[in-house]
Image (tube, helix red, strand yellow):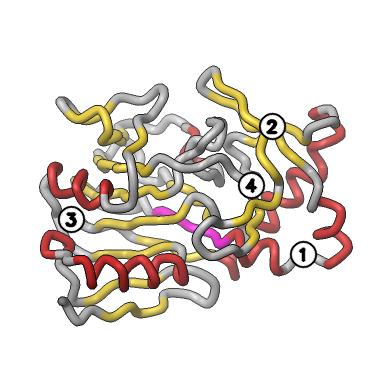
Amino acid sequence: MQKFTVEKLSGAIGGVVHDLDLALLDDDDFNRLCDAFWQYQVLVFKRQALPIDQHIEFGKRFGGLHTHPSSAGVDGHPEVLLLRNRGKSKTITEVWHSDVSCEEQPPSISILQCIEPPPYGGDTLFASQYGALGELSDGLKAMIEPLRAVHANFGMEATHPVLRTHPETGRKALYVNKGFTKYFEGMSVEESRPLLNYLVEQGSKPDLTMRHSWEAGDIVMWDNRCVMHYAVHDYGDMPREMHRVTIAGERPI
């Protein structure tokens, strides 16, 4: 068993794990790591540099793996999403989102490893949706409690509750995002837009966020069921390559 510690990174979300080698993780380490993950929602592991097979095996400890519906995987490993950015073009990652929430069973956990960071910029921001819900008034919480929202992209569409209950912690989190959520069930896009925009804005307030600056070998894992993220593309034509292993999820309730 490794005697690792977790250092809190912000008031609302995130922790950096010290003195843990993910390649040597035993069952006791894994159970303690899960407890920390449910608490911090985002965990950072500095300079791990896991080979692709070990990255996959680490992901499998959390459940079956998810294959992205439209983006390519690493050669020979379709379950490892290749994120290689060259040139400035706005993508889905440049808005606040939860990964592939347009699926009936969206991914639960994302585990992203930095292969090649840009020489500057390229940070990723994360926002706690537990915190977002907690800052809403009781009246607004009561109003949105029964609402469901339509999420769509990649030729897929799914309807999910606006307030999602986490299967491990039992806590409720706000579950709408700019990247995929289109409108509320029973309302038009125009009717939905003011409230939807307000909820996404509330969900990305600075006091609910943390920001990670990447180095080669860094791994960050986050819980899509209670976290939104935003990849900042501020590095022009500089290269940036990441590999993501994503865990298949359950139907939101």
The residue carrying mark 1 is 136
The residue carrying mark 4 is 253
In terms of secondary structure, where does tag 1 sit?
A: loop
Gap in Å between the C-alphas at discs 3 and 4?
Answer: 35 Å
Q: Between 247 and 222, which is closer to the camera in this rendering?
A: 247
Few, some or many C-alpha atoms within 10 Å of disc 2 (few <14, some 14-19, many ≥20)? many
Write the start and end of the magenta stretch as one range: 124-128
Per the rendering, the mark at residue 217 is: 3
**Is there any visible trace of residue 199 in the rendered image?**
yes
Camera-near label (1 vs 2) is: 2
Gap in Å between the C-alphas at discs 4 and 1?
Answer: 20 Å
User: Does label 4 or label 1 sit earlier along the sequence?
Assistant: 1
- Is residue 61 in the magenta section? no
Give yes or no for contact between labels 4 and 1 (Cβ–Cβ under 8 Å). no
- Say which residue appears at 16% left-offset and 77% top-offset: 2
Gap in Å between the C-alphas at discs 1 and 3?
Answer: 38 Å
Give yes or no for contact between labels 2 and 4 (Cβ–Cβ under 8 Å). no
From the viewer's perspective, tell me whether residue 146 is left or right of residue 135. right
Q: Position of residue 161 (x, y in %)?
A: 69, 44
User: Does label 3 or label 2 sit earlier along the sequence?
Assistant: 2
Please determine whether, in this image, residue 116 is positioned above or below residue 169: above
Q: Amino acid at mark 4?
A: Ile
Q: Amino acid at mark 1?
A: Leu
User: Does label 1 or label 2 sit earlier along the sequence?
Assistant: 1
The residue carrying mark 2 is 150
Q: Amino acid at mark 3?
A: Gly
Q: Position of residue 36 (x, y in %)?
A: 38, 72
